[in-house]
Image: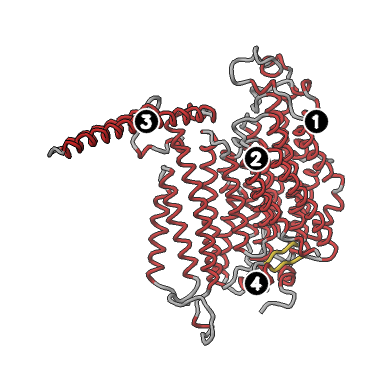
Amino acid sequence: MTASLTLVLLMAVLFGAGIAVMLERSLTRVLIGFLLVGNAVNILMYLMSGAPGLAPILGEGVDEGEISDPLPQAFVLTAIVINLGITAFMLALIYRSWWLAQLGAKGDLVDDEAELAEDAEEAADLIRSSAADDEAIQSIIDASDEEFDEVVAGIDEEELEREASARDHDDEVVTGHDGSRYGAGAPTRPPEDDDEGSRR
Amino acid sequence: MTATLVPLVVLLPLLGAAVALILGRRRRAQMAVGVAVLAAVTVIAAVLLVQVDATGPAVVYIGAWDAPWGITLVVDRLAAIMLVISAIMLLVVLVYSVGQGIADQHRETPVSIFHPTYLILAAGVFNAFIAGDLFNLYVGFEILLGASYVLLTLGGTGERIRSGVTYIITSLVSSLFFLSAIALIYGATGTANIAQLSVRLAELPQDVQLILHLLLLIAFGIKAAVFPLSFWLPDSYPTAPAPVTAVFAGLLTKVGVYAIIRTETVLFPENDLSTLLIVIGGLTMLIGILGALTQADIKRLLSFTLVSHIGYMIFGIGLSSVIGLTATIYYVVHHITVQTALFLTTGLIERFGGATSINRLAGLLKASPLLAILFFIPAMNLGGIPPFSGFLGKVGLFVAGAQGAGAATGADAAGTPSWLIWVVIAAGAATSLITLYALTRFWNMAFWRRRDELEGYESVLLGSVLEAPEGATVTATRTTPVLMVVATATLVVVTVCLTVFAGPLFEYAGRAAEGLSDPSIYVSIVFPGGTR
């Protein structure tokens, strides 16, 4: 059996790096390690399909010795799909454990009704802020209409200024809202400590 | 006729899961789908069992691609009995969880995803049992593992996430081992078909065989929770909801044991690791049960006995004789039902008494005699008290061990030394006694102890919500749903039936073991015309 040396080296590097990262305590790094090792295993499996560079198709005038084995490629595809599913689940798990770490014991007690109420509040805030938006835009349009009639040089700058101030105003509304939602009960932590929940 | 039924045991649960997912919030319809599907699979599995026993194994070549190329599904006697017992168990536990779900619409058991996930778990378990292809076995494992990740972290509370992470990472590592083993085996032999591997692996040099063999054993050993690889189990199982723990404890580890049986009998019958298996079996028994001794919480205690009793099965496999395998198959069937019944009863105790720790339970015998009976029978059964199947299974294993030891003292000096087998038999007897001690301790404290001996307990058990100290004890006043009790009682009756019908069952197990005694039997099932 012939195999590509590059792939063998790549596989070795992926295995080594993956296992090293997997041994970390942080859940996110464990996931990255799992992905690396998973891909190393996939390459290992791919290596078993024989000499590289050949198509896995047996057609007319193609000798049986000139194709690569299609079965490992099918295995690898299946394994990739399974890994994808597990990765998605792990990401959800990591997010959940981060969320719990942020809220501490309170995280367990936030139930659906409270979340729904929070969502409703958020939606209401959004509508309010967009109403403010509309007003600001309307005033700009009105102002520009008047100024357009007068055709005075320099209106552009004035208009831009007003627009800018309106935009600032919007931003303030949004950040204020976000801050009130996340900033209140939860002490902010550096991102490295995100999956504290998994460490306990 | 028989063969057409085989794919249905995987297809029905998968389709059922899809339907249940579409039904979404209509919980009653979901429950109906789940129960109907599993009932259908139970019937199919029973039909398969009868047919396979009467007319020989059923083989299906998916898509009519012949054996080495297509996916092969094989139902021999071993697979058939595993299918039947696991289908019955999954059905009973589903009924139990339906009872629980109707009773309390608690946030920790969101039913809308529970039913589809549960059915997918069932499909994965069944697929693993009938896989005739190493890669298909891997896919079966991944299906059941993926579903089990979701079930274990159901509700996403902090405790479950924490214990779920241990379980998930361990399982991922085991899957990586398994997949690497498949890749290397494919590289060495050019096939993943188990029957063909049986022929081709035997042609490899012994040291290559040893590496591949060990890789597979490590992968399956993690799943079966065999001693050095069992640390994860007691930490991760107890936090899940009672029905989920029951299924995991009863089934998932046995899927690993089943895979080990296949590895030892079909894939590597020549490459002898039986001494290693016997030693590991003995260690698993002792170390597991010593862990159980120190536990106050019944769920953790049962998790440790689970690990410990896996040791018996590994010991039986390690003996690698027909009678050893017979006893192992009987023991697997016994252990699936008994362990599940105990975990279901624990769920009832938790509901009724409001706690699972012996420090917070007392007077249950007087308060609920039925619950006491439901706990007592499987507990004595697991401890190996004579009339029950636990006793029969252990005696079967010890007899097999004694025969193995007798053979070892004879001309065949290459096998396991006979003193080692005697030591492990002694360890098995000790384990049985210690199991009895651990369970009796719980019985004495929770059931026999008078309620007034436990300070402040009155309010926990029967007091009204108003009297109860805030928060913790609301569960105690909930009524226990009839459906949960009925499901548990059914399973306890099944465990008793294992004793009543022990004769036919042992004979069947004997025929199943006979079919495993020579790998060429399995090969001739898949390749009626011989391998190329």
Q: Residue at the spot x=56%, y=67% of the render?
A: B185
Q: Nearer the viewer, residue A103 or B254?
A: A103
Callout 3 amino acid = Ala
User: Which mark is in front, 3 or 2?
Assistant: 3
Q: Characterize the local packing of mark 2: few (<14), some (14-19) or many (20 or more) Cα atoms within 10 angstroms.
A: many
Badge 4 vs badge 1, beta-carbon distance below 8 Å: no
Q: Characterize the local packing of mark 3: few (<14), some (14-19) or many (20 or more) Cα atoms within 10 angstroms.
A: few
Could you tell which of marks 4 and 1 lies nearer the N-terminus? Answer: 4
**Mark pair 3, 2: CA separation:** 50 Å
Seen in the picture, residue B415 relative to A34 is either above or below; the reply is below
Say which element carries label 3. helix
Share a chain, discs 1 and 3?
no
Q: Which mark is residue A131?
A: 3
Residue reaching furthest front? A149
Badge 3 vs badge 2, beta-carbon distance below 8 Å: no
Q: Which residue is mark 1?
A: B373
Say which element carries label 1. helix
Determine which quarter of the picture holds residue B99: top right
Q: Which residue is mark 2?
A: B244
Say which element carries label 4. helix
**Mark pair 4, 1: CA separation:** 50 Å
**Mark pair 1, 3: CA separation:** 67 Å
Q: Which residue is mark 4?
A: B196
Residue B420 image position (x, y, % from top left): 67, 53
Q: Nearer the viewer, residue B99 or B139?
A: B99
